[in-house]
Amino acid sequence: MSGSTFGKIFKVTTWGESHGKGIGVVVDGCPAGLSLSEEDIQPYLNRRKPGQSQFTTPRKEDDAVEILSGVFEGKTTGTPISMVVFNKTQRSKDYSEIASYYRPGHADYTFDQKYGFRDYRGGGRSSGRETIARVAAGAIAAKLLAELGIKVTAYTKSIGPVSLEEKNFDLSLRDHNSLFFPDMEAYEKASAFLKEKQGEMDSVGGVVECLATGMKTGLGEPVFDKLDARLGQAIFSIGAVKALEIGDGTKVSASFGSTDNDGFTNEGGKIVKTSNHAGGVLGGISDGSNLILRAYFKPTPSIFQTQKTVTQDGRPIEIQIKGRHDPIIVPRAVVVVEAMTALTLCDLLLCNMTATMDHVKKVYRDE
Amino acid sequence: MSGSTFGKIFKVTTWGESHGKGIGVVVDGCPAGLSLSEEDIQPYLNRRKPGQSQFTTPRKEDDAVEILSGVFEGKTTGTPISMVVFNKTQRSKDYSEIASYYRPGHADYTFDQKYGFRDYRGGGRSSGRETIARVAAGAIAAKLLAELGIKVTAYTKSIGPVSLEEKNFDLSLRDHNSLFFPDMEAYEKASAFLKEKQGEMDSVGGVVECLATGMKTGLGEPVFDKLDARLGQAIFSIGAVKALEIGDGTKVSASFGSTDNDGFTNEGGKIVKTSNHAGGVLGGISDGSNLILRAYFKPTPSIFQTQKTVTQDGRPIEIQIKGRHDPIIVPRAVVVVEAMTALTLCDLLLCNMTATMDHVKKVYRDE
Amino acid sequence: MSGSTFGKIFKVTTWGESHGKGIGVVVDGCPAGLSLSEEDIQPYLNRRKPGQSQFTTPRKEDDAVEILSGVFEGKTTGTPISMVVFNKTQRSKDYSEIASYYRPGHADYTFDQKYGFRDYRGGGRSSGRETIARVAAGAIAAKLLAELGIKVTAYTKSIGPVSLEEKNFDLSLRDHNSLFFPDMEAYEKASAFLKEKQGEMDSVGGVVECLATGMKTGLGEPVFDKLDARLGQAIFSIGAVKALEIGDGTKVSASFGSTDNDGFTNEGGKIVKTSNHAGGVLGGISDGSNLILRAYFKPTPSIFQTQKTVTQDGRPIEIQIKGRHDPIIVPRAVVVVEAMTALTLCDLLLCNMTATMDHVKKVYRDE
Amino acid sequence: MSGSTFGKIFKVTTWGESHGKGIGVVVDGCPAGLSLSEEDIQPYLNRRKPGQSQFTTPRKEDDAVEILSGVFEGKTTGTPISMVVFNKTQRSKDYSEIASYYRPGHADYTFDQKYGFRDYRGGGRSSGRETIARVAAGAIAAKLLAELGIKVTAYTKSIGPVSLEEKNFDLSLRDHNSLFFPDMEAYEKASAFLKEKQGEMDSVGGVVECLATGMKTGLGEPVFDKLDARLGQAIFSIGAVKALEIGDGTKVSASFGSTDNDGFTNEGGKIVKTSNHAGGVLGGISDGSNLILRAYFKPTPSIFQTQKTVTQDGRPIEIQIKGRHDPIIVPRAVVVVEAMTALTLCDLLLCNMTATMDHVKKVYRDE
């Protein structure tokens, strides 16, 4: 069944395979009148581009986005915005070997089980390249949110045992290192750790944290489209994510009501919370404080060590994966987490437009 | 905007408030020909019923379910199944105090912000009673899954610092203690811990684990309705959940590809995995091994200690919550996690029906 | 698959069978803050109630609606509004005969083919009683539209060969005759015609026209949720409708561009059309002029004449339908057409809230 | 709000404007394993191509379709199928005049009202070129239906006063005349009529009929996604359609139950209807007999006569439309009606897969 659409009002539909003609996305439901051009989107794609460091695959991928519809005279028209990144380097590489067996940790086996066969070239639809589409759409969502003062920022929180330290935290550093750490010390340590593991032909996991500031209250539609529920779908739809925390996350299970509850107070006439263990969500609805979430990524499944698996017809074999593969998913996933968070917030912001008769009358009364 | 519907084919729409006339659910899209009666559903509701132990509120709630439509001569007809649990004890209690301020950790503030006002009686729509509807629907999903050999089981994994121990794990024990632990030793320790915290007028958090056995391969629709993505939505839509893990969960971030990858082997002609770090999901699609997830619950926000908050008009006050409140959410949430998991699997099982032309021809060829 | 939900934002889910426990509906997505009580809804249900004339079945059905959720202190809360009409008279009548064969013109055969069996009591889910749910939901939609000045009115346009005449047209007469004609002369003629056909144990068809005044521009979402497309779904979802016209309808096929095009002019500073052949829809979007549509209903399939059909196992037989059956569907369908039109307009009015960044900023800027 | 998606399982999302970079469509939810290439789709596009006769615009548009994803080794993979037709001739024509006023009968005014501004080049999103996307998607649906023996065929039924005659009806003639009449005599007469009206600088309307043979029973999901309801949405979503009939259509309103009811009989062990006034739909579900519908199209709104309208700022003016415009929409709309009917049937065929536990077990039992 169709599963490539996200969102209820700001609807994003992605398409494309790793080694097909391109990767694309249709954004339907973007309000008319938002300034938009490729220049708004390309910087986001550049952040997920490979070949930026020794830890990402050095293959050259341009990933230049083209807007094909929905924008006229520099503004969105309210009609579907189609974007595409053509795959420039469709190498005629021989994939017949990879086609014949199931790589551990990859979707080869499950795609065959589900669909009867699979596009085995570079992972096909299950490739990380599919996230190009999400990032392009997320850039539009981020631009819309920015018009209302909401800013979404993701960064690397940890790689293997190396975590950023609160005392060093400086968001302005994020784009100054290839691991997207907002902490140069953590970046140095993580780099050393990655080099070591690369030497062992192994890969490692890590954590991406995402923060949204300037939040509005009221985002989230109880009871199944709550803000946290939709973030749950959004973040777990990213490949390799195995856990998600909102606010204090797993820690709450060992916490007490007396410490976990966020009190309320009055700050210059405005009701605000005195702490933010909840991470910005109460009863599934944004409470106006910062949204905070963490996504846990497994290690890259493609490693160069010998692994045991089976062929398509069930014959046990030993394989050794070749090619160029990042030893860590996290740095390139940072912008993907940011994009999926922005898409979720943008959609729920629009969903909340019809929450009250007051909103309805604001829009229609003087028309 | 509407947010009370879950599922794309097996569609569940819930309604009702804590102190309204009742709580109900419409299940639309259940295949015709499934044997069904209230007797299939009531045992699930009984598991979430309060008053079963010293740690759950002793108030008497019958929570007897009635099927109002969609079943004829003991079988589902393919038309919407409407179920209701009438609220028998709509006490004329005075809620005016609770109406005037925002309880910390509750949805009072966010509902007011979103909708302009709220049904303050017992939490209204944000009350835990809303889960009655999910559990009733989940019971139908579980019955359908059982017809195909899939069994979903949730249980308490930890309460505060007390976790079940692998060596004591025995699922048959789960229903023999009021905390739904599959480990009587853990139950005893957790009981003592809860008594202590109750004495301190405090509440505690905990973890629910859920296991699905007899899994089919192929469930999950890439890329946004992946099995883990839909579970992400389902589990985070439950109140008080602040983290979700699938398989090894947060641990993968400190793991290596060489240990995290699940190999494949051939067991009596059947391809199976040699381990299950993934928790049954590869590339967003079920791989046939057991599904494993863990939901982390925050402590009950209603505690009897004095707390700081504000009134609706922003005046800082100190409050003391009265009434009867469970010091722990987990035991009654066990069946809710089970229900939401069953609903997700059932919906995706039906979604997968149209994955291949082979499936389509199996159904239509001889008709 | 689930098919009992209509609308994208103002979502209506109906349930219930003719002889089950009741007929109900959940309205999810209604904005908070709309005044609402049973008194707003009951008058609509009374208009579709049987037993109002010699041409509608004299059986006594109270059809008293109860609101079970979503309304607090006289206003909608933004949460799902559940409504039910309990079936008071579940007669233990013997339906075994009707169960054994397929009534011509009814859904008996197709329900059996689709679902494997059917609730044969009084037509089950395919009974006209299902429209109770639509009418109850439509009453809420109509109330919301009225707050913005939009008024939806349906009436009988023709019964068999008897049509209302333009010169007699007076909407205030509609509720003063049991056929809901806005023309007493047409009512008299149609009554005589119906009596004659009843004597011949036959039934007749007719036409319902629906008019919406006070229209806003901008309703309808190109290209598949255009105003006329959604009306197409809404009206054809009513049983017995075999044709729908919007504006000039079938006549346009014999018309010319020079006469069919509606010109524009300026009326006191406001752009208006100089004619309304289009019936209020241009390019799938409301143009601010009156919406006009006509639904064509087939004759009641239950007639007392002998008819040829087959039993469930394919044996040819002759049958004679018993019981009480209206010889004409149209009068009771008037309010159903009105309800479905109101539901469509209300949903598209809310959908249009996010059409422009201007709308978005109007709602969020000062929050 | 998003409105460019049609279908619940076989989901079609279109994008593109008349004079943008191209027109495209993403088909998500097509089962894996269907043979597919551009050669299956191009013939459908060729049928809607302009420049095929003296009555269609002679401008040269290649409209060559490219499949960008979702097909591997000649078969659909179950992932989204993206298709595009690039606009080859983006003439730098001056559209500033057309931009300044509202053409009667076009969507200029309503797009401005809804979105605040519009892409005025050639009608933008409201152009007939948008149907390219529907036709491309419809070709896939038709191929899938054909695998199960269902064949959908549309043809011109009438142009102005000229209707095809039953005695001349021969489907094999349809593609042998530029008006797509299955009747050469009607073609000749209509040609003469069109030439006359072209001379008068006027345009005319007409009727497209569509027939589906080899139908399965069970298609259609009561109560809002009935077969006729979904056809209602599908057909009215085509620009210029002002009426839709199913089976006997408007005639039923003047008919009697005794003649309108289709009886049942047994033909060689198979239950069949003795007539087909219903046009293949009973209770919103396909009954196995032929599906028959008729769409009524208004005259082309672009005519060369002088017309009265207003400028964007409300100043009354007289305009004369220039350029090349078909004097009749019908011939090029034939394949569009066919495509939308095929899309509806294909989606409902897949929706019906989960109607019974028997279907579910057929698919899963031996897996």
Image (spheres, coloured by chain):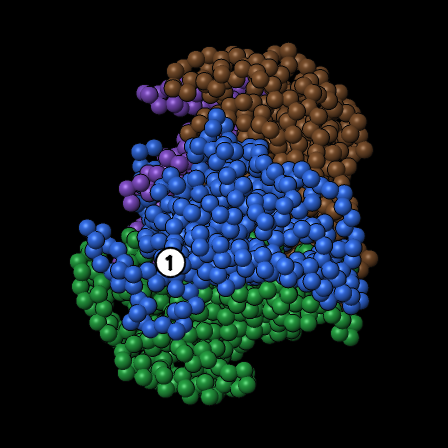
Chain colours: A purple, B brown, C blue, D green
Asked whether the viewer can see residue A355, the reply is yes
Residue B10: percent from left, percent from top: 64, 48
Quarter of the image where one finds residue A311: bottom right
Residue C356: percent from left, percent from top: 33, 48
Near-viewer residue (C81 or A350): C81
Residue B65: percent from left, percent from top: 70, 34
Quarter of the image where one finds residue B188: top right
Q: How many marks?
A: 1
Q: Quadrant of the C terminus of chain D?
A: bottom right
Answer with left or right where residue C268 lies relative to residue C175. left
Residue positioned 74% across, 47% down in the render: B72
Quarter of the image where one finds residue B179: top right
Near-viewer residue (D309 or C354): D309
Residue positioned 76% across, 71% down in the render: D266
Tell me the chain of label 1: C
Q: Amino acid at mark 1?
A: Glu
Residue positioned 17% across, 63% down in the render: D317
Residue D357: percent from left, percent from top: 74, 54
Near-viewer residue (C233 or D167): D167
Q: Is residue B99 above or below residue A201?
A: above
Q: Is residue D138 above or below residue B29?
A: below
Q: Which residue is denoted by mark 1 in the rendering?
A: C166
Secondary-structure class at tag 1: helix
Answer with left or right where residue C346 lies relative to residue A242. left
Asked whether the viewer can see residue B211, the reply is no
Near-viewer residue (D355 or C144): C144
Crowding near the residue tagged with mark 1, few <14, some 14–19, many ≥20 C-alpha atoms within 10 Å: few
Residue positioned 49% across, 58% down in the render: C189
